Image (cartoon, rainbow, N blue to C red):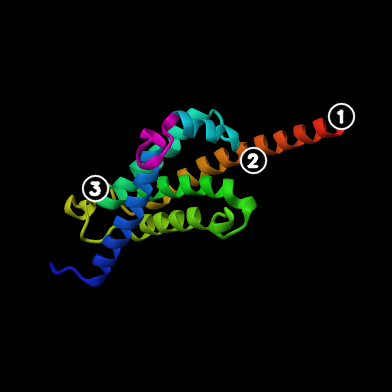
Amino acid sequence: MSCYDRRDLGLLLLRLGTGGVLAAHGAQKLFGWFGGHGLEGTGQFMESVGYAPGKASATAAGLAEAGGGTLLALGLATPAAGAAAAGAMAGAAAVHLPNGFFAQEGGYEYAASLGLAAAGLAVTGPGRLSLDHALGHVFDRGWMVPAALGVTAAATALVVGLRTQRVRARREGEQEVLFEE
């Protein structure tokens, strides 16, 4: 069947919207575009929330968001693109977790929504209106989905776990100083 159906159109819209937002956020981190702070400012922020080294963390997050988002929008290497973006959003959600769910309270709602959309696209695939389809799915094989999501989940768990330890140690150090004074 050469005719595109509403599933293909829906996946295209979801890829363009999710990928475009992710790419813009990554460009803020990497280049300071769209009101972002670039690698230097984002690196300082990353350090302040427990991701160290800050500049390397900013680079990794920016590449996962900008690269993953761009590839999602294009529908190219969709399993890897969706997994990378989902991993970056899991890291962002960890920062916002103490603030609860809703974004207006500083919660993780927005990061979780983007991450779940990216992961869903990694699993579902890009549809026929995509570069993956045009290229015969050479970068979108069935085995790539669990491989990309598994590797990303392991790396994300390690990075977020280390961040959690840093934040906890920092908090305990601050409490010791309070009691000494």
Left or right: where does residue 89 sit relative to residue 97? Answer: left
Q: Position of residue 178 (x, y in %)?
A: 82, 34
As drawn, 36 above or below 75:
above
Q: Residue at x 49, y 53 (%)?
A: 111
Residue at the extreme front of the image, as rendered: 35
Q: Amino acid at mark 1?
A: Glu
Residue at the extreme bottom of the image, as rendered: 6
Q: Quadrant of the C terminus?
A: top right
Residue 37 part of the magenta-drawn span: yes
Asked whether residue 150 appears in the rendered view, the answer is no
Residue 22 part of the magenta-drawn span: no
Segment colored magenta: 29-39
Element at badge 3? loop
Q: Label 2: how many residues lie within 10 Å, few (<14), some (14-19) or many (20+)?
A: some
Labelled disc at residue 180: 1
Q: CA distance from mark 3 to mark 2?
A: 38 Å
Q: Residue at x 59, y 38 (%)?
A: 49
Q: CA distance from mark 1 to mark 3?
A: 62 Å
Q: Position of residue 102 (x, y in %)?
A: 56, 60
Q: CA distance from mark 1 to mark 2?
A: 25 Å
User: Which mark sits nearer the N-terminus, 1 or 3?
Assistant: 3
Residue identified by numbered label 3: 138
Q: Amino acid at mark 3?
A: Val
Labelled disc at residue 164: 2
Q: Which residue is at the front of the view, 39 or 80?
A: 39
Q: Magenta stretch mostly in which secondary structure?
A: helix
Asked whether residue 30 appears in the rendered view, the answer is yes
As drawn, 160 above or below 132:
above
Q: Quadrant of the N terminus?
A: bottom left
